Amino acid sequence: MTRPLMRPLMGVVCLAATTALTAPPVLAQEAAPVVAAERAFAADGLALGIDRSFHKWSAPDAILIAGGQVLNARAAYPGTTDLDPAAPTLVWWPNWAGVAKSGDMGFTTGGVERGGERRGHYFTIWKRQADGAWRWVYDGGSGASSAEVPPASSEPMILATATVGSDSPEAAMAEVRAAEAALAVAAATDSRSAHLAVLAEDGRLYVAPRPPAIGRDAYADALSGWPPVFAFGPTMGGGASDAGDLAWTWGEATWQGAGGAARAGHYVRLWQKRPEGWKLAFAQLIAAPPPQPAAPAS
């Protein structure tokens, strides 16, 4: 299920590039501002309502994917609707988080409760703005089970920060687009093997309605819940960190559903650069609503 609708991305140049590549990794504690931003966002959801909290915490170009559409967050949530005390409460909290070694981009994901009932997971990409404030650039949901997620009072697990990066965000995105293109080619004939070849051992894969898969054995089992082949379109958006070590992407996907019905949706992915190359730290598929049956001829 989709959280956004329920909760209602010459010398000086060389020196800079070298510094980005050789700077010490950001410690795990550096993910704390991202976790704090997510928690403040969630708290505002209860205090201000979904419309005002989503508007307040989103960047001007932030997107969400819901109902098969990619929407500008501030257009979807203009921030003009007050909290409805009678509406079911929407609560979410970070269970896993990470940050780029340049400290300008991060993510969190965790459980969602609506009206006291656990209803899946959210996934948010955060970017530090020019004024130092953290704002999210992507927010989406998944129907992956959150039954086993630790409570909101627990501290989230932290993805180890990368030790390598690309020369620039632009270079990182070019490399990631190439990795995505290779994944698309492989997934067109064997989705399971294609994903297993690029998933990071410490990453997560969301295949609804299963719980998040963590680790190779869990990946292999979870992938049996996805179609055997996908048609993944090219990267349509996303962004990379200043250090070129973390990048997120989204694009379109089509596949055959139950009974051979044509289905469509979007993929959302988080890539992290490792010494051996780019690895998929997070992946999910957001299915569009199934097509409605044609009305009988009159």
Image: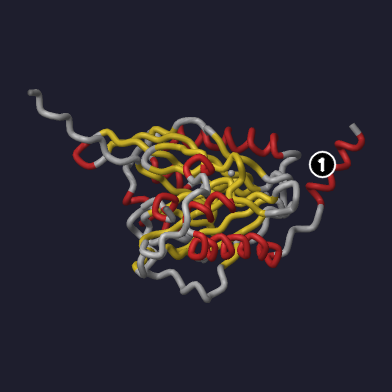
Going by the picture, which residue comes out furthest to the bottom? 153
Q: Give the residue type that dot 1 points to.
A: Ala
Q: Residue at x 70, y 39 (%)?
A: 169
Question: Measured from the top left, where is residue 149 in percent x and y?
Answer: 44, 69
Q: How many marks?
A: 1
Q: Residue at x 49, y 56 (%)?
A: 204
Please tell me which residue lies in front, 142 or 64: 64
Pointer 1 residue: 17
Q: Quadrant of residue 36?
A: bottom right
Per the image, label 1 sits on a secondary structure element best described as: helix
* Quarter of the image with the C terminus in it: top left
Q: Residue at x 47, y 64 (%)?
A: 92
Please tell me which residue lies in front, 20 or 147: 147
Please tell me which residue lies in front, 47 or 253: 47
In the visual, does 33 lie left or right of 41? right
67 up-or-down from 297: above or below: below
Q: Quadrant of residue 157?
A: bottom right
Q: Residue at x 40, y 43 (%)?
A: 66
- Local packing at callout 1 (Cα closer than 10 Å; few below 14, some 14-19, many 20+) is some
Question: Measured from the top left, where is residue 61 in percent x and y?
Answer: 59, 39
In the visual, does 235 lie left or right of 129? left
